[in-house]
Image (cartoon, grey):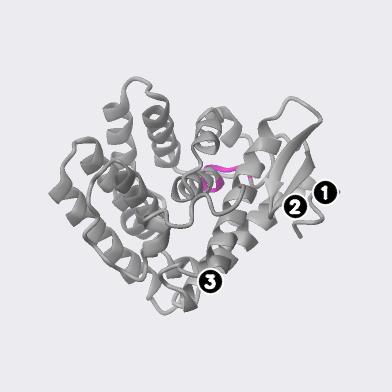
Amino acid sequence: MIDGLEADSTDLGDAQQTTLTLAQSHCLLDPRAAIFRTWDAWVTAMQISSAVFDAATTTEEHVQCRIAHQNRTLQATGPQWYVTPGSWITAFYLAVICREKDRITALCHVPLSLLRENGTRFDAYHYDWIDTLQTYWLGGPDLVRKLVAAVDGTGPQTASAPETAGKLMYPPMEMFHRFVRKDHAGFTQALTTALQWHKEYWTEESRMYQAPGLVALAPLAMACIAHDAGIPIEVESEYLPATLLGRNWCGEFPT
């Protein structure tokens, strides 16, 4: 699939889903992400996720992207069905976990308007959360107001999928809230709760065999931000691969 992206770059959406599933699945047998192949899989998922937005936002006919140890020339795609708030949030989390500052910055310059052009409907809190993360990373104004809007949007009265919003989308927002307040104890409690809700959500019978349940992606990303800012992460969990959190593999090969 990756080798075919230069011929048809609109396969990036399927490639993002497939490579993320593969990365998460590696953690079934390697929950600490201690094996090189696991890191390699996470880097590839991160590269594909970033390439989705490189290809969607470029003003040239082609864009150069490094994917799976090779520099590849991808076609400009513009808005596509897979260029969504959900794919942006995934790309951001993966770039944070892999400590790719330039990719994070590029993602934070993706206009929200682009994410509204795919024809699918997302709740307002998705856009508010993206706005919050972009504002934080770029040092923009009104961070607290935007975070409050995102949190309020996950409430059961406003969210179209209350369980998903409450157990998966709200927890990283609460972790981020504690992080920006420099509330270390509150951050630890929010991380613990996030992992508990992740487990509750993904061990429900209809979901228990799905790859996204293997790693708590959003809490992991927030924990990586806190870890790099000097907040001690005192929670251990198989949902939180320790080697990814500790950035042990970063710099192992050009990414």
Dot 2 alpha-carbon crowd within 10 angstroms: few under 14, some 14 to 19, many 20 or more: some
Q: Earlier in the sequence, mark 1 or mark 3?
A: 1
Extreme residue in the right direction: 7
Extreme residue in the top direction: 141
Name the quadrant of the N terminus. Answer: bottom right
What element does badge 1 sit on?
Answer: loop
Name the kind of residue labelled 2 in the image. Answer: Asp
Residue picked out by circle 2: 11
Dot 1 alpha-carbon crowd within 10 angstroms: few under 14, some 14 to 19, many 20 or more: some
Q: Position of residue 198 (x, y in %)?
A: 34, 64
Whether residue 141 sits left or right of residue 60 in the image: it is left
Q: Earlier in the sequence, mark 2 or mark 3?
A: 2
Whether residue 228 sits left or right of residue 213 in the image: it is left
Looking at the image, is mark 2 or mark 3 nearer the viewer? 3
**Tag 1 near tag 3, CB within 8 Å:** no
What element does badge 3 sit on?
Answer: helix
Name the kind of residue labelled 3 in the image. Answer: His
Residue 106 visible somewhere in the drawing: yes
Residue picked out by circle 1: 8
Answer with the quarter of the image where residue 109 lies. top right
What secondary structure characterizes most of the magenta part? helix
